Image (cartoon, helix red, strand yellow):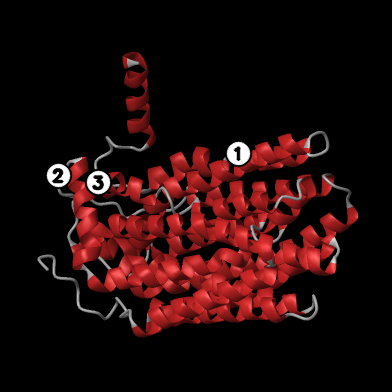
Amino acid sequence: MIALDSLIRPALRWLLQLDRPAPRLSDAELAVEVERHYRWNFVFNLLDGASFFFGASFISASTIVPLFISKNTPSPLAIGLAAVIAQSAWFLPQLFTANFVERLARKKPVVVNLGLFLERVPVWVIVLSAFAASRSPAWALTLFFIGYAWHGLGAGVVATAWQDLIARCFPVERRGRFLGITAFIGTGSGTLGAAVSTQLLQTHPFPTNFVYTFAIGAAFITISWFFLSFAREPAHQVDPPVQSGREYWSDISRIPRRDHNFRRFLIARLMLALGGMGGGFVTVSALERWSVPDSTVGVFTAMLLLGQTLGNLVFGFLADRFGHKLSLELGALTSTLAFVLAWLAPAPEWYYAVFVLSGVSLGAVIVSGILVIMEFSEPARRPTYVGIANTAVGLVAIIAPLIGAGLAGIDYLLLFAIAALVNLIALVLMRWWVKEPRWASPPNPLS
C-alpha cells in the first residue's frame, strides 16, 4: 500500500502540474492577461465545445439512448436509469472536488490531463456496447451503462475545474456570448448529425446502425479534447484559506444560510431540475402511443437540436446584456409549454413542437444554468459555489427520473402534466423570488 501510494502521488503531481509555479498577479495584471489571450481562447474553446456538442448529438440522452435501450429491454426502469445518469452524473461529483480545485493555481491540467481518461475514453465503451447487442442484450446494456456512467461521472469530476477555467478565460460580460455561440455552432451542426443518425438508423439493421452512430459521436467527442488542450489559461497564484475537511464542510453548510439570494436561487433551480422528470420518456411515449418508426427518432433529435440551437444563441447574448436569471425564467416557461403539449398532444406530429420547446429550454440551462452560479461569489470561492449548486442539482436529478419512471408506469399523460406543473412553480420562484446576482448586493459574510 505504501509503495503504491509513493507511485500514485508523484504521478498525480506530474499529471496536474502541481510543482509548476504560477505568477502572483494583481487584478489589473490578470485582466490584461485575460485580454491578451482572449481571441486564442475563444477560437479553441469554441472548437472544443462545438465538436463536443456535435458528437453528443449522436448519443442524445433524449432520443438515441432511450431507443437503444428499448431495443435491448422493454423495462422503463432501464430508461429511467439512463435518464438518472444523463441528468445527474455531471452534477453530482462537483462539490466533492471543489475544495481541491480552489487550491489549484492551474485548472487546465485537471480538465485536459484527467479529462482524457475520465471523460473521453469511456465513450468508446459505449461503442463496444453496440457491438455486443448482436450477441447478448444483457451484455450490451451492462457495457452501455458502464461507459455511460463512467463518462458522465468523469465529466463531473473535472467540471468544477472546467467552469473555473472558462471563468478565468472570459470576462463576465462576454461569457454568455462565448458559451451561446459555442453551443449554437455545436448544436447547429448537431442538427446535421441528427440527419446523419436518422439515415443510419433507417438504412442499417440493428445493432449495426448504433455501432456507426455511437462511433461517430465518440470520434468527435475525442477530437474536442485536442482543441481543448490548446487553451491558454491565465493562471495565477491563489491563497485559499487553510481549512481542515471538517472546517470546509462546516463552511459549506453556512453559505446558503448567510447568502439569502443564493439559497433562494438553489430552491428555484432544484425545482427546475425536478421538472425534468419527464424528459427521458417523451420519445418512448411517442413510440408506444403511435408506433412511430425508428427513423422518426432522428427527426425528433433534429427538432430538439433546432430548438437548442436557437436557445443557445439567443440566451447567450440575452444573458450578457440582461443577466442569466431572465434566461432561466424563459427556459422554465418553454419547458412548461413543452410538457403541456406532450400532455395534450392528439397526434405524433405535435411532438415536433414538444422537442423544439424542450431544446430551447435546454439551451437556457446549458448557457445560463452553468454561468449564473459564477456570479454569486467572489472568484476565490467560485468552485465552492459551483459545487454546492451543481451537486444539489445532481441529487435532485437522481430522484426526478425515478419519479418519472414510476409515473410513466401509471400513465405517460399524468407524468407530463405533473412535470409541467413543477416547471411552472420553478418559473414563479425564479421570476419573483430570486434577484439577478449580477446587480444584487453581495452577501454579508457575518450575517
Q: CA distance from mark 3 to mark 2?
A: 9 Å
Q: Position of residue 165 (x, y in %)?
A: 37, 55
From the viewer's perspective, is residue 354 above or below residue 3? below
Q: Which mark is residue 103?
A: 3
Q: Quadrant of the N terminus?
A: top left
Q: Nearer the viewer, residue 333 or 288?
A: 288
From the viewer's perspective, is residue 312 above or below residue 154? below
| Residue marked by disc 1 | 146
Please say if the residues under marks 1 and 3 sit with CB atoms less than 8 Å apart.
no
| Residue at image coords 69%, 67% | 411
Q: Quadrant of the C terminus?
A: bottom left
- Residue 142 visible within the image: yes
SS for tag 3? loop
Sequence order check, earlier mark of 1 and 3: 3
Q: Nearer the viewer, residue 414 or 81?
A: 414
From the viewer's perspective, is residue 212 above or below residue 356? above
Q: Where is residue 300, by image quadrant?
A: bottom right
Q: Position of residue 213 (x, y in %)?
A: 75, 51
| Residue marked by disc 2 | 242
Left or right: where 396 falls relative to 124: left
| Residue at image coords 29%, 55% | 384
